[in-house]
Image (tube, grey):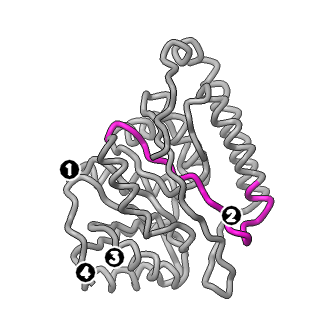
Amino acid sequence: MTAPPASATHLVLIPSYNPGPKVLDTVAAARACWNPVWVVADGSTDGSTERLQQMAAADPGLRVLALPQNRGKGAAVLAGIEQARREGFTHALTMDADGQHPAEQITAFMQASQAAPQAMVLGVPVFGPEAPRARVLGRKISNGWANLETLGAGIGDSLYGFRVYPIAPLAQVMRRQRFMRRFDFDPEAAVRLVWAGVPPRNLPAPVRYLSAQEGGVSHFNYLRDNALLTWMHLRLLLGFLFRLPRLLRRSRPPLPFQ
């Protein structure tokens, strides 16, 4: 297979924590579609970091950034985008390491970002029959809160982590406060970027929930992570009320599907 040409502005960024062997397939699929691909190994202890480093040694389009201890998804993304910004990249497509996200959609999302570089390109999940009903219902609730907190700015899905961010505003938003470092990263990033004036562009993309037999690994904890999301939306609601006059003045229709 011919490797894709290297991009000077857009990279794929994959935060990874104890993902199991499935991460190798995920990274290989991403590399088949884009160059470069960076993996941020977030203090993994399952041997995946070493296997990824071996993979990267034979592939100049792949880089592994190894963090010494687990800090959370948002912290891993922040470490990646800060390094990417230092090297001149302007946009990062984030995707999960566990095989849930569609690598074959990377090019389409990158093209949408290149056509509207001021925007964030948000994946809107197309669920298969295996999707847990509780997870589907839970994200509907989170989406409702996110759209309230942004006056219906057009966040198609607040939790789906397959998306392209403009790096500079995301890094600025994250450096201003200490939240957005763990499971709360994806929804809070979308809301705070809208507050910062970054418009959302929504594109549909399939999502798979892999069984353990298929190599699926999930670190989602219903009690802990739903409590985290509840606290997140409470503080975002307070931030929304503070910003409400400004948001009313700035309100505008969202960018449409393409």
Q: Which mark sits nearer the N-terminus, 3 or 2?
A: 3
Q: Residues within 10 Å of mark 2 (few under 14, many from 20)?
A: few
Query: Left of 186 or right of it: where is 169?
Result: left
Q: Position of residue 145 (x, y in %)?
A: 69, 36
Q: What residue is pinned by disc 1? A: 88
Q: Is residue 174 magenta?
A: no
Is there a contact, CB below 8 Å, between mark 3 and mark 2? Answer: no
The residue lying toward the viewer, choosing from 198 and 66, is 198
Q: Position of residue 67 (x, y in %)?
A: 41, 65
Q: Which mark sits nearer the N-terminus, 1 or 3?
A: 3
Distance from Cα at disc 3 to Cα at disc 4: 11 Å
Distance from Cα at disc 3 to Cα at disc 2: 28 Å
Q: Residue at x 31, y 41 (%)?
A: 117
Residue type at mark 4: give it.
Asp
Is there a contact, CB below 8 Å, between mark 1 and mark 3? Answer: no
Q: Which mark sits nearer the N-terminus, 4 or 1?
A: 4
In front: label 1 or label 3: 3
Q: Which mark is residue 59?
A: 4
The residue lying toward the viewer, choosing from 177 and 253, is 253
Q: Residue at x 65, y 68 (%)?
A: 219
Q: Which mark is residue 220?
A: 2
Query: What secondary structure is marked by label 3?
Result: helix
Residue type at mark 3: give it.
Ala
Residue type at mark 1: give it.
Gly
Is there a contact, CB below 8 Å, between mark 4 and mark 1? Answer: no
Distance from Cα at disc 1 to Cα at disc 2: 33 Å
Q: Residue at x 34, y 71 (%)?
A: 33
Q: What residue is pinned by disc 3? A: 32
Distance from Cα at disc 4 to Cα at disc 2: 31 Å
